[in-house]
Structure formats: structure tokens, C-alpha cells
Image: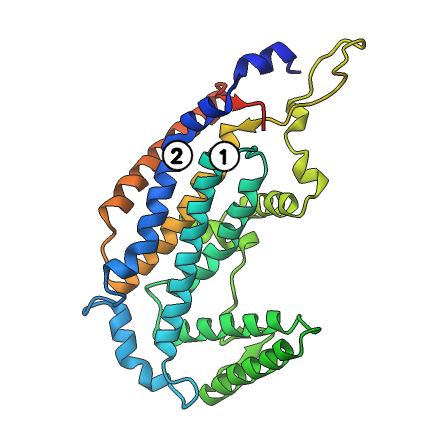
Amino acid sequence: MTNRADKEAASVSNAEFREYMRPLSGALATYAAAMAAQPEHNRNLPAHNSRAMAELAAQETWAIDEWNEPARNAHSYGSLLAYFVAEHLAAYAAIIDGVSVGPRYAHMATARTIFETVPIAHWLLEPNITLERRIKRSIVYRLKSANEIGRMQHIEKLVHQSTENRARCERFVKFHGWTVTGIAIGGELLPTAKTDFSKAAFGAEFVGLDRTLWGMMSGAQHGTWYALADGLKDQILDHDPLDPAGAVVPLMVTSENLTMFGVMSWHGCAAVANARDELMGWRPSDDMLESGKTIQAIAQSFAVHARSKTPRPDDSDP
């Protein structure tokens, strides 16, 4: 059990803690900005010899009157989600570097958004699939969106929009003779963070890890006690029965927690960025490459620390 003296010795001030974390927050922010800027740096056009350009040239084969640019639409959905996760990666960096309280919990909501979105973005942008499969995936994505809008039953306009969007998807699918099972189209089913994050981010399945991390992030985002109290068992203080502090437990902000979720969020974002670059025929910018190297070095150091259990600075005053 950890005693009060040990905790006080291991803690540092807010300013010292943020300075200690700045290599990570700075690299995450740099990578996020560079990832978000990639389309503009490439004039928002795929390279002339890229797979994406070939798909645009072939999209007429799959077009119908009310859906006449299916390849461009599919690219756009994936590209928007790539920007979305980059923005949240930047927000994660800002939470580490700039908030006046914590961050003990706030970063987990941002990380969860990245975890939820990365599998879908990577799935839409996956470079080495046929155009038919990409278009199927884009329709699955739109159909899922239509279903979500339909949950807003108290807003008549949105109910109508849901019905119209579903009908458009169904007409497109029927025209091409694809099978529909639930919201799976031609065997293409929307991936989820609970089972598919690691496959997208690392190229290998770790379903147990995905479910555990998603559960903790989801619990924290919804204010569930088990997630908010996670780790407090390691911070309970020995105390004298006459100690006026009683059994009060400080909420410790740990570098380990912030680093773990930050590095994993970056891995997910980098997988999406790499898929987009390969599909579009773009080269990663120097900022993406250099900041990525910095994050990988931090991750390596973190892994060594995790094995050795060496104490790292904590901020005891969130």
C-alpha cells in the first residue's frame, strides 16, 4: 500500500508535469496539424498515377442518376473522417498541455472519439481493395448514418431526412443487385472500436485489448463509477485514525495514463493517414515523419518503463 510520504515525493507541480509531458503533447500537436493539412498541400487532388485517380476515372460504371460520383463520395467520407481524427488528436495534445484542471479523465473522451472513428476511416480509405468494395462500404456508412438520424423521432424534418437517405441507399443497392443483411451490404459490415481498432491501427487483432480500452473510455465518458474510480485502489493512503484527512484519496494525474492513450491514439491516426496517402498517391510531409519518430521513441521508452515499473512524475493537484 502506498503511503502519503511516497505519494508526495512522487508528485510534481502542474507546471513541472506539463513540461515533462511536452515532448509528447508537442509531437502529437505537430502530427495532427500536418495530417489535417495533407489535402491542402496536395491541392485536394489525388496524384495522377494514384489508385484514387483510377477509381475516379472508373466511377461512371457504378454511377446512377441520383448518385453520379460514387467513388468521389467514398473518398470524401474517408477524407472527412481523417480530418476528424486529426482534429481530435490535436485536442488530446491541448488537453495535456493547456487545461487548468487535470487531466485525470477528460483526455479519455477525446481518445474514445479517435478509437471509435479510426476503424471506420481506415476501412473507407483502405488502399488495396476494389472500387466495388469501396463503394459498398461508403453506402454502408451512409445507411448507418441514416439510421442514426432516424433516432431523432421528435424532430419531423430529421425523420423525413432519415427516410429519404435510406431510400436512396436502397435504390443504389438494388440497382447493382447487392445483397443486404441488416446494415451489411454485399458482405461489407461497418467495423467497430470494440473489435477492430487494433486491426486498423497495428495490422493485427487484439480484441481483448480493444474491448478493455473501449470499456474504460466509454465508462469514463459516461461518468460511470467503475471507470472514474479505476486506479484509486493504487492511491489509497495509510493513515492514522486521528488524521483529520481521514481516508481522503487525491486524484492523481499520471504520465503513464496520458502517454498510453496518447500513443495509441496516434497509432490509429497514423494508420488512417498512411492509408489515405497510399490511396491518394501522396507523400507524408516532413512534419508527419519527424513528429512520428518522436512519438515512436516516446512509446519505446514507455514500454521499457512499463516493464521495469520505474516511477514517473505525477501531478497530484488536478
> Badge 2: few (under 14), some or many (20 or more) residues near its Cα, within 10 Å?
many
190, above or below 174, in the image: above
Q: Which residue is mark 1?
A: 258
Which mark is first along the chain, 2 or 1? 2
What x and y, as percent, mark residue 187? 50, 72
Answer left or right for 67 relative to 311: left
4, above or below 126, in the image: above
Q: Describe the element under mark 1 as helix, strand or loop.
A: helix
Q: Residue at x 26, y 44 (%)?
A: 287
Amino acid type at circle 2 is: Leu
Q: Residue furthest front?
A: 100
What x and y, as percent, mark residue 167? 56, 85
Q: Residue at x 55, y 42 (%)?
A: 108
Q: Quadrant of the C terminus?
A: top right
Q: Which mark is residue 129?
A: none
Amino acid type at circle 1 is: Leu
Answer left or right for 193 relative to 94: right
> Badge 1: few (under 14), some or many (20 or more) residues near its Cα, within 10 Å?
many
What x and y, as percent, mark residue 299? 39, 34
Q: Describe the element under mark 2 as helix, strand or loop.
A: helix
235, above or below 215, in the image: above
Of 120 and 186, nearer the camera is 120
How far apart marks 1 and 2 lie (CA) works out to 9 Å
113, above or below 23, in the image: below
Res 187 seen here: no
What x and y, as percent, mark residue 69? 36, 81
Of 267 and 291, nearer the camera is 291
Q: Which residue is mark 2?
A: 24
Of 50 and 180, nearer the camera is 50
Answer left or right for 129 relative to 114: left
Res 246 seen here: yes
Q: Are marks 1 and 2 in contact (CB under 8 Å)?
A: yes
